Image (cartoon, grey):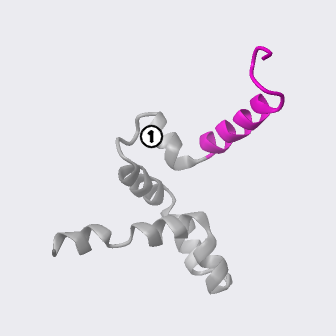
Amino acid sequence: MRKGGAPGYTAVMSSQAASVIDDPVVELLLTGRADTADQAERLYLEEHLDEVMGLVNSPLSDEEFRRHPLIAILLSSGSRGWEDSIL
């Protein structure tokens, strides 16, 4: 086997690494600004609150609105901690 693995392997790994680096939540974790994924998501949402409000007031359809990455994070985190705390 050649040094560097199978042909195309490096390109795939580079593409995967780039997509992880482009993830703002992962970036907050890797830079040490957040200790957990939950903390990173909350921090990211707080830092982009103006954009979230702009999306709320935008003419996007409900489907487009829910697919936006910021809104997807917001909807996935929701009140999960509160739901778990009442059990």
Residue 11 x, y percent position in the rendering: 79, 33
**Rendered position, 28 above or below 52:** above
**Residue 12 located left or right of residue 51:** right
Quadrant (top left, top right, bottom left, bottom right) of the C terminus: bottom left
Question: Which residue is more in the foreground, 73 or 33?
Answer: 73
Tell me the SS state at disc 1. Answer: helix
**Residue 59 located left or right of residue 44:** right
Magenta residues (range): 1-22
**Residue 75 located left or right of residue 85:** right
Q: Residue at x 51, y 44 (%)?
A: 26
Q: Looking at this rendering, what residue extends furthest in the right direction? A: 7
Residue 28 x, y percent position in the rendering: 47, 42
Question: Which residue is more in the foreground, 83 or 8?
Answer: 8
Q: Is residue 19 magenta?
A: yes
Residue 68 x, y percent position in the rendering: 62, 69
Q: How busy is the neighbourhood of tag 1: few (under 14 within 10 Å), some, or many (20 plus)?
A: some
Q: The residue under label 1 is which amino acid type?
A: Leu
List the residue tagged with mark 1.
Answer: 29
Question: Which residue is more in the foreground, 1 or 4?
Answer: 1
Q: Is residue 15 magenta?
A: yes
